[in-house]
Amino acid sequence: MKKDEAPVASEKFVVDKTVHAVIEISSRISPSNKDGISAQVESMHRLHGASILHDACQILKLPSSVFATACTIFHRMYHRISLRAHCVWSVALGCTLLASKVDEEPRQVRTIIVAFVHIYRRRRLRAGDDVKRHSYGAADCEAEGAASLTNGEKENVLRSVPPLPMGGPVYAEWKEVLMNMESTILRTLGFTLYWIPDKVPQRFVLYFCRVLEIERKAVIQQAWSYLNDSCFLDLCVRYEPELTACAAIIMACSDHDIVLPDAWWEAFIGVDRGTDLSNSINSILAVCDENDLGLRRARYAFLSSLCKEESFNDPDSYVWSAIGS
């Protein structure tokens, strides 16, 4: 670029917020698709499981790198198994335990179970979600009377619940599911998880920002936030982490009106990647849409499993009736 030339903005087709963002559906036939589950339904259940992982990592005070690792294990798992075989709650349990070990941020089994039971109660009460404004109709799976409570009353209910006893049958049920799922994930993925923490986009975004001389903390934080949103989708399976990091930087710079050199991402991911970047950006923007009822239900409510046999915590299960609201 000549000194007297103004820097050219990124290609317009890559990020265009005037176009309604849509979550990209993979063209690859997954095990769930083979079991008769549509791509849209599978996407919602994947999002549901990733949102559970997000809540668990926050409660357990795990860094975002552990969340990214857990989501990578989660999405890779469902590219090998079907939602008919294992529910997202059981897989999320195992992913949390394994990710905390792989990232050297271990948490006790009891601590993880208590965190998941708390999330389970919150989802049934739909705490943090506006029940009157966002109704999911007959699809709701919630505790009796939840719709009549304010969010403050729901929080009081959650605070008044006694701790889960370690010697009780409910704790034993959750622990058995966790231990079995840890073994299942390791066998399914070939016991090779050591490489995942170094192959998440969070490992690349700060380096890319330094190379591009982006120094504003707000921009870097925005890019990091977009990467956290990307973990709700299976982008980690379909695209290399460097591409997702570039997509996050493009969106963050667009939000803050920062102009970067034309096609700068080619230095990191090669040429002819505009379509992949556009698909990634649209998917991340779509998952941030708080007005989409399907997305809100997946992120804040409870979805019944699609297992051939009833999951351990589905409505009408022992756990559902034993864990009161």
Image (cartoon, rainbow, N blue to C red):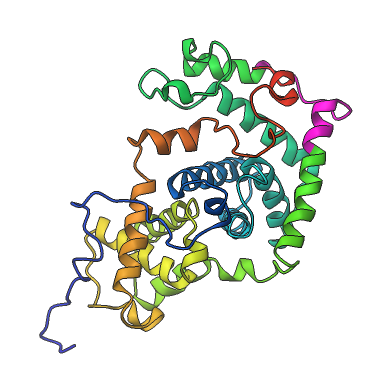
In percent of width and height, residue 257 lies at 21, 60
| The quadrant where residue 34 appears | bottom right
Q: Residue at x 54, y 66 (%)?
A: 200
In percent of width and height, residue 57 lies at 61, 46
**One can see residue 201 in this view:** no
Q: Residue at x 78, y 26 (%)?
A: 164
Q: In the image, 135: left or right of 29?
A: left
Eyeballing the image, is 145 above or below 44?
above
Q: Residue at x 70, y 54 (%)?
A: 100
On-image quarter of the N terminus:
bottom left
Task: Please count the marks in the image.
Answer: 0
- Residue farthest along the bottom direction in this orientation: 2
**One can see residue 318 in this view:** yes
Q: Is residue 162 magenta?
A: yes
- Given residues 66 and 170, the one toward you in this image is 170
In percent of width and height, residue 205 lies at 45, 68
- Given residues 192 and 222, the one toward you in this image is 192
- Given residues 168 and 163, the one toward you in this image is 168
Eyeballing the image, is 221 above or below 142?
below
- Given residues 195 and 219, the one toward you in this image is 195
Q: Residue at x 17, y 77 (%)?
A: 7
On-image quarter of the C terminus:
top right
| The quadrant where residue 192 appears | bottom right
- Residue farthest along the left direction in this orientation: 4
- Magenta stretch bounds: 160-174
In percent of width and height, residue 83 lies at 60, 46
Q: In the image, 13: left or right of 217?
A: left
Eyeballing the image, is 126 above or below 192?
above
Q: Is residue 66 magenta?
A: no
